[in-house]
Image: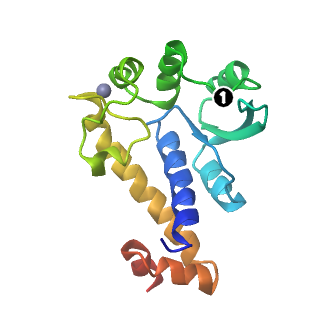
C-alpha cells in the first residue's frame, strides 16, 4: 500500500463522519485519532460541534476521542455518561445506547448482541460504507445507503477542494483520484 493512502483514508473517514453528523444521518460520531485543524474547522463550518472526551483503556492509558454532534444536549449527555469510563462498550444496554447515539438500526444492534461475529447481510461494497454491521436480512440498513453515499461524495469534494488549494505535494495526491483530478485540472 502506498504510504499516502492510509492517512488520506483516515482523514476522508473523519470528514465522512462529520458530514453524516451534519446531515443528521448520525446523531453523534466518534473519531479515535488526531485530525488536522483545517478538517475540524471545515466540519464546524457545516454546523458540527466537536468535543474531546477522555476514556481509559484496560491498562489505564487515557484515550482521547473526538465526539461530533449537532445537538449540544446530546453531546453533553454523552460526555457525562462515557467521559472518564473504561473503553468497554460490549454490555447490551451500552450497545443499544450507542446504536441510538450513532444512528445504527436497532435490528443490527440486537443482532450484534446475540451474535457478535455474524456476517453482514449486505454486499461487501455496501457494508464498507457503514460504520455498523448490517444484520442478516436487514431492511433498515439498505435504506440508509443513499444518504451514506451522498455524504461520502460531499466528504470527497471537501477533501479535493483542500488538496487542490494547498501546495504541490497535496495537489499531486489529488491528481490520483478521478474526482480530484477534475478539480485540479
Ligand atoms: Zn439491521
Looking at mark 1, is its residue's CB closer than 8 Å to ligand 1?
no
Q: Is residue 14 or residue 113 the one in the foreground?
A: 113
Q: Please provide percent x and percent y for residue 117.
A: 38, 30
Query: Which residue in the protein does label 1 denote?
Result: 87
What's the residue at 44%, 75% (across, down)?
180
The colour scheme used to paint the residues is rainbow
- For mark 1, does the 10 Å Cα neighbourhood hold few (<14), some (14 to 19), or many (20 or more) residues? some
Q: Is residue 132 left or right of residue 97?
A: left
What's the residue at 61%, 83% (across, down)?
169
Q: Is residue 117 left or right of residue 31?
A: left
Where is ligand 1, by quadrant?
A: top left
Q: Is residue 26 or residue 35 the one in the foreground?
A: 35
Q: Please provide percent x and percent y for residue 167.
A: 64, 83
Q: Is residue 141 left or right of residue 185?
A: left
Q: Image height check: is 87 above or below 77?
A: below
Residue 162, by quadrant, is bottom right
Q: Please provide percent x and percent y for residue 106.
A: 38, 20
Q: Is residue 142 left or right of residue 67?
A: left
Amino acid at each position: 500500500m502506498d504510504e499516502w493512502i492510509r492517512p488520506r483514508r483516515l482523514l476522508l473517514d473523519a470528514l465522512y463522519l462529520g458530514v453524516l453528523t451534519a446531515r443528521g444521518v448520525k446523531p453523534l460520531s466518534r473519531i479515535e485519532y488526531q485530525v488536522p485543524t483545517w478538517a475540524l474547522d471545515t466540519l464546524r463550518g457545516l454546523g458540527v460541534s466537536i468535543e474531546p472526551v477522555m476514556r481509559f483503556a484496560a491498562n489505564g492509558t487515557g484515550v482521547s476521542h473526538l465526539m461530533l454532534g449537532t445537538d449540544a444536549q446530546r453531546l453533553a449527555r454523552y460526555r457525562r455518561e462515557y467521559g472518564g469510563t473504561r473503553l468497554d462498550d460490549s454490555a447490551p444496554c451500552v450497545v443499544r445506547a450507542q446504536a441510538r447515539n450513532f444512528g445504527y438500526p436497532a435490528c443490527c444492534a440486537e443482532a450484534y448482541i446475540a451474535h457478535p461475529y455474524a456476517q453482514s447481510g449486505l454486499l461487501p461494497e455496501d457494508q464498507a460504507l457503514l460504520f455498523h454491521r448490517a444484520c442478516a436480512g436487514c431492511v433498515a440498513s439498505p435504506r440508509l445507503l443513499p444518504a451514506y453515499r451522498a455524504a461520502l461524495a460531499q466528504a470527497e469534494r471537501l477533501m479535493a477542494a483542500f488538496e487542490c488549494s494547498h501546495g504541490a505535494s497535496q495537489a499531486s495526491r489529488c491528481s490520483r483520484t478521478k474526482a480530484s483530478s477534475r478539480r485540479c485540472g
